[in-house]
Image (spheres, rainbow, N blue to C red):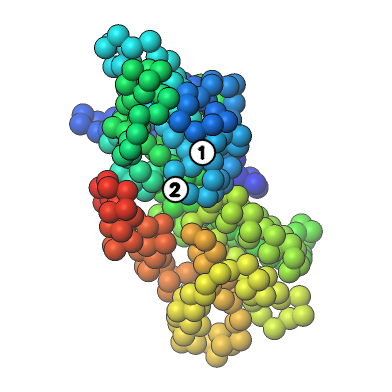
């Protein structure tokens, strides 16, 4: 896959091998063309490369914006069927931003993650209701987007061009941020970060690992980048949660989260008290920014293990609810878009 960790040692197991058992749906495809247009309802022009901006869409395209239909995709196989009916059409003629090959796009459930080039997309809608015959219909003689096109939001920013891989990967995206003055200067090994990578292997992909000094503004800036630009589902911080004058991770986290998730931190402190009364001195907090869960963990490897073991059983369901692909949240998104939810 195309994810590039910020620091060597990050784990990323999303690489598809391209080999499928009989009856399985394709999980790997290719980008045939990328296109954009300055006006809605018109054919899109093929370009050499597009930039997919997080929570926005294709930069320079008329359909970009904060809604759930930020990017449109259509399979070359669908266009080929239109050609077989005598239509003179090519990629972009049906108003799609990304033309693919090798993936059964209409069969992808809402909530499916697509690793597209170095960007990440999340499927939000399959097809759409065509309320009027736009310029595309009259120019092409038909429109297959309402039945076979799909729409997605941009989870993580990145560039996309013809020939790039596009892979299905529904693993949770995880980042680890270690706050340590000595660690950032290379004076101390970040053993807590290594412990986290091992423990999180079954929860999702650790696609980025960041080591920063105990600086409130620097920590806040990294949390914002990881949540807003890199589209992480989960950010775990380690270090800077004590009483020391440089322990500012909780304050940096509170400055960027929009909603608190106090139960996680309360559970970790309660579990820690079974081992030592010093657990009550931890000031770590947990909260949500957009669709990203941020959790503060202590700095010592032993405390990291104890704390994460306590909350780990609850995290898969919590992250699925946050993404809108579990329980009532997934059902509501499906009802809004008129498509089946991801099971």
Residue 172 visible to the viewer: yes
Instruction: Decide: is 264 above or below 91.
Output: below
Q: Position of residue 311 (x, y in %)?
A: 43, 71
Q: Residue furthest bottom?
A: 277
State which mark lies toward you, 1 or 2.
Answer: 1
- From the image, tell me which residue sits under label 1: 63
The residue lying at 59 percent from left, 77 percent from top is 284
Q: Position of residue 288 (x, y in %)?
A: 52, 67
State the SS at label 2.
loop
- For residue 156, what is the image quadrant? top right
Q: Residues within 10 Å of mark 1 (few under 14, many from 20)?
A: many
The residue lying at 62 percent from left, 73 percent from top is 254
Q: Position of residue 187 (x, y in %)?
A: 77, 61
Closer-to-camera residue (161/269)? 161
- For residue 256, what is the image quadrant? bottom right
The residue lying at 37 percent from left, 57 percent from top is 324
Q: Residue furthest left?
A: 23
The residue lying at 35 percent from left, 29 percent from top is 133
Residue 113 visible to the viewer: no
State the SS at label 1.
loop
Q: Residues within 10 Å of mark 2 (few under 14, many from 20)?
A: some
Number of the label disc, if any, that sits on residue 68:
2
In the shown orientation, is residue 89 left or right of residue 223?
left
């Amino acid at each position: 896959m195309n994810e590039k960790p910020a620091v060597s040692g990050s784990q990323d197991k999303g690489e598809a091998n391209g080999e499928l058992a009989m009856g399985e749906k394709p999980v790997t495809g290719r980008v045939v063309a990328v296109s954009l247009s300055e006006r809605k309802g018109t054919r899109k022009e093929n370009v050499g490369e597009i930039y997919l901006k997080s929570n926005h869409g294709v930069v320079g395209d008329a359909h970009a914006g904060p809604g759930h239909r930020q990017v449109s995709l259509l399979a070359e196989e669908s266009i080929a069927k239109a050609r077989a009916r005598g239509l003179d059409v090519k990629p972009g003629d049906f108003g799609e931003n990304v033309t693919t090959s090798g993936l059964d796009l209409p069969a992808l459930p809402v909530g499916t993650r697509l690793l597209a080039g170095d960007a990440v997309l999340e499927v939000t809608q399959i097809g759409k209701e065509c309320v009027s015959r736009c310029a595309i219909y009259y120019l092409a003689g038909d429109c297959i987007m309402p039945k076979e096109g799909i729409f997605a939001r941009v989870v993580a920013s990145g560039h996309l061009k013809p020939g790039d891989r596009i892979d299905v990967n529904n693993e949770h995206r995880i980042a680890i941020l270690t706050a340590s003055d000595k660690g950032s200067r290379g004076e101390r090994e970040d053993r807590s970060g290594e412990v986290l990578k091992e423990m999180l292997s079954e929860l999702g992909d650790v696609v980025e690992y960041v080591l920063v000094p105990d600086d409130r503004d620097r920590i806040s800036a990294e949390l914002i980048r990881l949540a807003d630009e890199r589209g992480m589902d989960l950010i775990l911080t380690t270090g800077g949660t004590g009483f020391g004058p440089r322990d500012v991770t909780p304050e940096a986290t509170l400055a960027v989260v929009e909603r608190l998730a106090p139960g996680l931190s309360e559970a970790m402190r309660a579990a820690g008290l079974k081992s030592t009364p010093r657990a009550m001195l931890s000031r770590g907090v947990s909260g949500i920014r957009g669709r990203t869960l941020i959790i503060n963990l202590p700095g010592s490897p032993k405390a990291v293990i104890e704390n994460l073991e306590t909350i780990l059983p609850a995290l898969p369901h919590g992250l699925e609810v946050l993404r809108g692909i579990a329980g009532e949240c997934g059902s509501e998104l499906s009802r809004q878009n008129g498509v089946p939810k991801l099971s």
